[in-house]
Image (tube, helix red, strand yellow):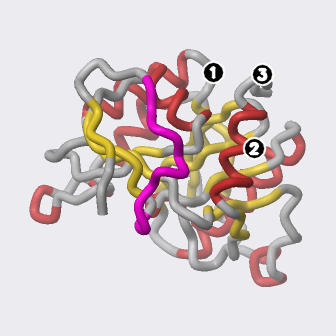
């Protein structure tokens, strides 16, 4: 299917409704903190192999969590007491821990956290856009999750943990935090921000993009 090719230095994106059947809108261009924020405001997200051109996507339908979410399943209310999920400001430690999990040379893929994205996420955290949560077992860091907060939407970036119970607790903890802080939606589309234990909602691309554009003029909590 045809897609748009973005030149280096491009700061504008094609409309999301030009996406092909797989949701691919454009290939190429640059990526930095401001471009990433603009992409999210236009209903697009990046996802690509670290050694290849940047790809920009807007699938239809879109996987989200609409807030408030239903209460966690009963088994999650009795998770092992040694497991804790808490907000953290230590982006350096959490992102480096993520790299030890996903940056495996023998199977480099789209989950790889490059140094470029490490710098971009660090800048977003300094600018108060990136929100991070640490997952600990008996006080030891075993995983985490983070995403970009714009207006009333939380755009999920990564979640990682040794087991599905920890990942589900992480997402439900995030959902509770977002709900208490005025968020309306959590974008769950990226493959690196999904848990089989947490059912997602689906909304049309049109509805999602409209929500993003209205949300773009709202200050994030």
- Front-most of residues 54 and 25: 25
Which is more foreground, mark 3 or mark 2? 2
- Residue 181 occupies which quadrant of the picture? top right
Residue 219 image label: 3
Percent position of residue 199, x then y: 69, 76
- Front-most of residues 13 and 215: 13
- Front-most of residues 133 and 58: 58
- Residue 211 occupies which quadrant of the picture? top right
Query: Is 16 inside the magenta-drawn segment?
Result: yes
- Of labels 3 and 1, earlier in sequence is 1
Query: Is 149 inside the magenta-drawn segment?
Result: no
Residue 136 image label: none
First to last magenta residue range = 12-22
Q: Which residue is mark 1?
A: 128
Percent position of residue 91, x then y: 48, 31
Secondary structure under tag 1 reads loop
Tell me how far mark 3 sits from mark 1, CA to CA.
11 Å
Q: Which residue is mark 2?
A: 211
Residue at x 30%, y 27% (from the top left corner):
30
Residue at x 61%, y 74% (from the top left corner):
165
């Amino acid at each position: 299917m045809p897609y748009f090719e973005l030149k280096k230095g491009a700061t504008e994106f094609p409309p999301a409704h030009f996406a092909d059947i797989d949701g691919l809108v454009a290939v190429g261009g640059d990526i930095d903190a401001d471009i990433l924020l603009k992409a999210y405001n236009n209903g697009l997200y990046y996802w690509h192999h670290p050694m290849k051109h940047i790809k920009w996507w807007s699938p239809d339908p879109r996987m989200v969590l609409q807030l408030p979410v239903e209460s966690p399943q009963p088994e999650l209310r009795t998770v092992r007491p040694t497991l804790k999920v808490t907000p953290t400001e230590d982006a350096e430690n959490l992102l480096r821990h993520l790299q030890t999990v996903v940056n495996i040379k023998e199977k480099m893929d789209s989950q790889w956290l490059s140094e470029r994205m490490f710098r971009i996420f660090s800048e977003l955290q300094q600018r108060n856009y990136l929100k991070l949560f640490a997952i600990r077992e008996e006080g030891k860091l075993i995983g985490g999750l983070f995403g970009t907060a714009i207006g009333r939407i939380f755009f999920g970036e990564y979640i990682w943990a040794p087991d599905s119970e920890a990942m589900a607790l992480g997402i439900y903890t995030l959902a509770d935090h977002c709900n208490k802080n005025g968020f309306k939606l959590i974008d769950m589309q990226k493959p690196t921000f999904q848990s089989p234990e947490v059912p997602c909602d689906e909304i049309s691309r049109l509805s999602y993009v409209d929500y993003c554009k209205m949300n773009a003029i709202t200050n994030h909590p």
